[in-house]
Amino acid sequence: MSIKKNNDEKKEDLTSRPNLSKKIKVYKDPLFNIGDIVKHRIYPFRGVIVDVDPEFSNTEEWYQSIPAEIRPSREQPYYHLMAENTETFYTAYVSQQNLVGDGENGPLEHPDLEEIFSGMNHGKYHLRNEVRN
């Protein structure tokens, strides 16, 4: 895949935001599945889920780079997304508490979708048979 890496959870001016992670109920079980279209609750991007970690599974450096006052809990599902915004396409790693469903807003334009998905139906992308485990 030819996509840029982006750390969506850390943004430059996050310290001025209230502690958003404590205002949201954190669920231990996944609310989303591979192929679901989601959008970030705070930042202007959306994506399709390509993998799910049952809890945080990235580097300590990445986790600590998120300002403490908005750092999400590790003990929740984290999702790997093929993401897009108005400027670019990239991969993102996002905590469940920061995602909401967005299938009703139509398909994505990510150029690498066809490598993993065969199409979409009812707001959800379907995995190609050859990429299923």
Image: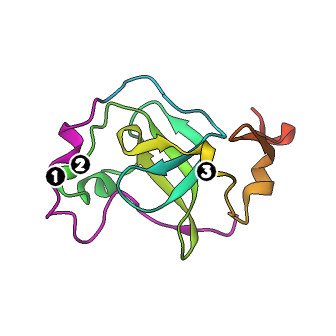
Question: Which residue extends farthest top?
Answer: 29
Q: Quadrant of residue 78?
A: top left
Q: Which residue is mark 2?
A: 71
Q: Which residue is mark 3?
A: 105
Q: Disc 1 and disc 3: Cα gap in Å?
A: 32 Å
Q: Which residue is mark 1?
A: 68
Q: Are marks 1 and 2 in contact (CB under 8 Å)?
A: yes
Magenta stretch: residue 21 in it?
yes
Q: Quadrant of residue 84?
A: bottom right
Q: Residue at x 43, y 62 (%)?
A: 44
* For discs 2 and 3, the disc positioned in front in the rendered view: 3
Residue numbers of the magenta segment: 1-25
Q: Quadrant of residue 10?
A: bottom left
Between residues 36 and 7, which one lies in front from this camera angle? 36
Q: Position of residue 66 (x, y in %)?
A: 25, 57
Kindly report the secondary structure that dominates the magenta region of the rendered protein.
loop
Give the tally of numbered discs: 3
The answer to whether 73 is drawn above or below residue 18 in the figure is: above
